[in-house]
């Protein structure tokens, strides 16, 4: 087994020597001990709910990883974008679609299941159900939220190879801080989803536009990672630049409108259109004078660009609990494709799936 | 800053005062150069965890910062916060200011700390009252768990009234902690000492802070019973209830907690405060039934001010405890400077056993009489006074009886009894004292229930006098007072003819006087020449009877 690193703090873990723990009722880690009379089947069953700590239990900053985390290839995906860029809604929509058990995913040979059931259930309860089922606007992510993966999935591809995919969704305020040592996933993330907030893009070309501070921080932090000599000019990370809330700009630009119109489930799993979409997004951002927002695409070794809308509308009405809800036009547009593109760029899917087909118009 | 109280308002904005997007300072009274520093201190404390306002108090660079944060729903759900900064503000005052009516003011200005102090005091008082009324059932558990590591940070989960708990735990341990009344997680390193979570939510990050939870039984029974006792005192009487046992400074470690618990209890579960003893249940007081505990009670009683003893003396106390306190109180009231309130309190507990009182007798007889009158049953008192009177000179007894019979007839009667027993040894000086006080006839009248009984008492005394004590001069002197009771007593005792004639003449005179009659002239020798040379006739000076010999009603 190769070295195992904590996806949250990037500490190396002596995986095989680390005993299993369970999480007690008070949220504290408790050593899991096999009863001498316990059957092997029962013990294995209990281990499916167990964790291995990345450090000494009882010390601050120790994280609990699913007991079988190291059995799979780790893929860490971080959401990058300033406050209210749309990261949380986009990720919830992405994971919702990914976990929807939609038959179209079979075309890609993907099977998805929770890696950490407790984490996944929490994510479903706090994000996916309110957004997708109740159409409720999600609260902004506090900058004080615990830095940890918000969901962890086991994704198995057509070659029967499984990946431990962890997602990070931190507050934009925190991502924009230039010296936040607590955010460690830059060191190990396989992919970053750069979420572009179309509302903050310049109205016209303006070279003085500062761009998104969180993009800058991410790219700066990626600069410390060792780069393979062959790709020395680029950050060794996959980047998906997603123009989120694309419904807000669909009437400003025909390109956007056209791409959003191609929102069927079948189209979403069709990755051969990614390159064309990337070109269009690039062109759109260039036209908007948003060169700063293009830096991830320019500086990361693998990159794709997308239009997406997690809600296809703005929350306006209020429900009985006075929460803002999304109106009838609510639906997810092209949210899965950026994630699938990331999967292709990180080896979960065959990267060749991103190559445009000969029939694909250019 | 000194007396100035600065304010900062936080909410989401496209561009804060610091030029950042997102949650940041949007209004501030601080000098602009200080804002970035304070933003670094506060920015992780401004996020609301729920719809109800949450409060966080932290101290940065010696300046107290109290934040009120609320969830906002006008746009995308988020947070808004309002901070008060003052070097004068302690955690306790911050608790009081949580109910300040200036939160959410439309425009911020620099405030003056003295203007805020009344609001802080008022709020703290309200919080304390709430803590005492609503937390009784769970505070002891939390306090006991806190005592395991008194100086460390802790998290309380699911507490419906976090501010009251913070106030109460601060009062109990002796120092109000920095606090965050409503957080969504407790794994951040910069959290205040006391953190409150609505629930123990699942997290991949291990929880390292201690988590206090009502209902979690403590293995350490001694610590647990101490916590119960202290909380009981606090809930019953507030800060006054624990004033006697609060340490000078909060305990810093388990060893200091043990020392404190040891010093602050007479016995496990009984805090070392005499004034609280009457408020404890018999079951709790049962813990004092051992020598070590009683020694502690005794030491505390010796050192206690009289006012504490007064509060402590109570019929409900177990006999052995009451005995310790009464003995100490007896020592106090038997000293020269008796505390009248303490004596009154002892009297309320009376009558006390004779042997208990006899162990702490005052030196002066007046004091003794007063002391025993308050504390002893009449029979015991009589025994004690009679016994003590044996050592007092007879003349002194006569004087005492005469002077105190009106105010203390029972005491006087006891002393009179002693006098009667010792009267046969009366000296001439003693007799002179007795005659000078009309053979105590007035005093006897106070002690007796009837004239007849008075006469019997007098006869008893006069008969006990040494032989020949009632010489004619003495009889004449006494008879000259024409007191009927005295005359009756003399008439009973005197047998020689001249003496009896003198007595009878005084009896007649008394009768005439009582009926407004003149004495017959023939009775006087100078008026009857035939008798003028009668050798055996003694002249007895006529004296008008005293105005009133009757015992006042």
Image: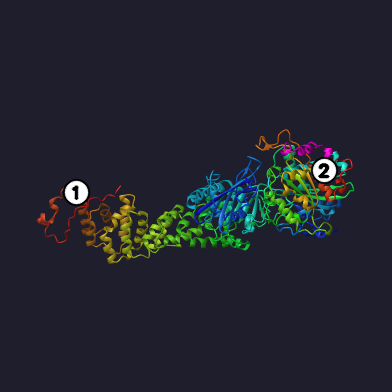
Q: CA distance from mark 2 to mark 1?
A: 149 Å
- Magenta stretch holds residue B146: no
Question: Which residue is label 2 attached to?
Answer: A276
Q: Which residues are magenta?
A: A248-268
- The residue tagged 1 is B512
CB within 8 Å, label 2 to label 1: no
Say which of A103 and A23 sits in front. Answer: A103
Instruction: Identify the chain of the residue marked 2, using the numbered disc in the image.
Output: A
Nearest to viewer (mark 2 / mark 1):
2
Residue B302, position as x, y percentages in the image: 49, 62
Q: Secondary structure at mark 2?
A: helix
The image position of residue B230, as x and y in percent, is 57, 54
* Residue that appears at 31% across and 61% down: B399
Magenta region, main secondary structure: helix
Q: Residue at x 70, y 54 (%)?
A: B207
Would residue A35 be found to the left or right of residue B151 on screen? Answer: right
Q: Nearer the viewer, residue A37 or B255?
A: B255
Q: Chain of mark 1?
A: B
Horizontal side, residue A102 vs residue B465: left or right: right
Quadrant occupied by the C terminus of chain A? top right
């Amino acid at each position: 087994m190769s070295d195992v690193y904590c996806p949250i703090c990037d500490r190396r873990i002596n995986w095989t020597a680390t005993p299993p723990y369970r999480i007690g009722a008070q949220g504290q880690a408790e050593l899991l001990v096999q009863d001498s009379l316990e059957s092997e089947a029962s013990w294995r069953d209990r281990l499916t709910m167990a964790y291995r700590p990345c450090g000494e239990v009882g010390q601050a900053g120790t994280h609990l990883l699913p007991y079988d985390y190291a059995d799979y290839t780790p893929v860490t995906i971080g959401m990058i974008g300033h406050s209210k860029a749309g990261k949380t809604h986009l990720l919830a929509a992405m994971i919702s679609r990914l976990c929807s058990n939609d038959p179209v995913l079979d075309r890609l040979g993907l099977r998805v299941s929770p890696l950490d059931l407790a984490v996944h259930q929490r994510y479903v309860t706090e994000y996916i159900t309110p957004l997708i089922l109740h159409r409720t606007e999600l609260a902004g992510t506090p900058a004080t939220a615990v830095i940890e993966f918000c969901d962890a999935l086991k994704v198995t591809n057509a070659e029967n190879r499984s990946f431990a995919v962890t997602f990070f969704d931190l507050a934009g305020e925190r991502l924009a801080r230039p010296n936040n040592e607590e955010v460690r996933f830059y060191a190990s993330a396989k992919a970053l989803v750069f979420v572009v907030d179309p509302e903050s893009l310049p109205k016209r070309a303006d070279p003085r536009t500062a761009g998104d501070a969180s993009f800058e921080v991410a790219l700066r932090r990626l600069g410390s990672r060792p780069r393979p000599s062959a790709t020395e000019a680029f950050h060794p990370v996959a980047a998906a630049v997603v123009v989120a809330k694309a419904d807000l700009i669909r009437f400003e630009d025909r390109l956007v409108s056209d791409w959003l119109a191609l929102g069927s489930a079948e189209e979403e799993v069709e990755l051969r259109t990614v390159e064309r979409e990337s070109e269009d997004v690039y062109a759109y951002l260039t036209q908007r004078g948003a060169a700063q927002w293009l830096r991830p695409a320019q500086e990361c070794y693998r990159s794709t660009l997308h239009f997406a809308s997690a809600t296809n509308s703005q929350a306006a009405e209020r429900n009985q609990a006075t929460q803002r809800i999304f109106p009838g036009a609510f639906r997810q547009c092209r949210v899965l494709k950026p994630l699938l593109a990331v999967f292709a760029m990180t080896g979960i899917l065959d990267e060749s799936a991103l190559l445009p087909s000969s029939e694909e118009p250019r | 800053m000194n007396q100035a109280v600065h304010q900062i308002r936080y909410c989401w904005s496209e561009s804060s005062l610091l030029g950042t997007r997102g949650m940041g300072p949007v209004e501030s009274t601080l000098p602009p150069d200080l804002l970035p520093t304070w933003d670094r201190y506060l920015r992780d404390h401004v996020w609301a965890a729920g719809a109800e306002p949450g409060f966080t108090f932290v101290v940065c660079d010696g300046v107290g910062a109290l934040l009120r944060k609320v969830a906002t729903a006008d746009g995308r759900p988020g947070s808004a916060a309002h901070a008060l900064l003052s070097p004068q503000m302690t955690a306790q005052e911050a608790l009081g200011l949580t109910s300040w009516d200036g939160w959410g003011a439309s425009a911020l200005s620099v405030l003056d700390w003295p203007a805020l102090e009344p609001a802080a005091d008022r709020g703290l008082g309200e919080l304390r009252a709430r803590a005492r009324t609503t937390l009784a059932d769970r505070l002891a558990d939390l306090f006991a768990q806190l005592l395991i590591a008194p100086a460390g940070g802790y998290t309380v989960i699911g507490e419906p009234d976090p501010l009251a708990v913070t106030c109460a735990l601060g009062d109990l341990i002796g120092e109000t902690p920095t606090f965050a009344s409503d957080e969504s997680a407790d794994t951040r390193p910069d959290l205040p000492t006391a953190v409150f979570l609505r629930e123990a939510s699942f997290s991949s990050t291990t929880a390292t802070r201690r988590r206090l939870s009502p209902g979690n039984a403590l293995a350490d029974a001694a610590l647990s019973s101490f916590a119960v006792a202290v909380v009981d005192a606090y809930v019953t009487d507030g800060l006054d209830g624990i004033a006697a046992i609060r340490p000078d400074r909060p305990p810093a470690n388990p060893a200091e907690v043990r020392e404190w618990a040891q010093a602050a209890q007479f016995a496990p579960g009984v805090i070392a405060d005499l004034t609280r003893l009457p408020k404890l249940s018999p079951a709790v007081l049962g813990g004092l039934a051992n020598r070590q505990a009683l020694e502690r009670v005794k030491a505390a009683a010796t050192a206690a001010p009289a006012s504490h003893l007064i509060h402590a003396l109570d019929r409900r106390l177990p006999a052995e405890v009451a005995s310790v306190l009464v003995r100490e109180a007896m020592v106090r009231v038997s000293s020269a400077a008796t505390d009248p309130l303490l004596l009154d309190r002892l009297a309320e507990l009376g009558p006390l056993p004779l042997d208990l009182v006899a162990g702490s007798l005052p030196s002066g007889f007046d004091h003794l009489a007063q002391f025993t009158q308050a504390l002893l049953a009449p029979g015991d008192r009589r025994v004690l006074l009679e016994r003590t009177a044996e050592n007092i000179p007879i003349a002194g007894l006569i004087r005492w009886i005469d002077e105190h019979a009106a105010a203390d007839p029972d005491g006087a009667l006891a002393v009179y009894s002693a006098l009667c027993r010792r009267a046969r040894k009366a000296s001439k000086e003693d007799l002179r004292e007795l005659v000078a006080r009309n053979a105590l006839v007035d005093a006897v009248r106070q002690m007796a229930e009837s004239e007849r009984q008075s006469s019997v008492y007098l006869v008893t005394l006069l008969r006990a006098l040494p032989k020949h004590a009632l010489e004619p001069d003495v009889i004449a002197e006494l008879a000259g007072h024409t007191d009927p009771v005295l005359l009756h007593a003399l008439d009973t005792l005197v047998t020689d003819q001249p003496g009896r004639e003198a007595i009878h003449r005084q009896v007649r005179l008394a009768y005439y006087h009582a009926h407004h009659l003149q004495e017959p002239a023939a009775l006087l020798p100078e008026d009857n020449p035939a008798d003028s040379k009668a050798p055996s006739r003694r002249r007895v000076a006529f004296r008008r009877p005293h105005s009133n010999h009757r015992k006042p009603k």
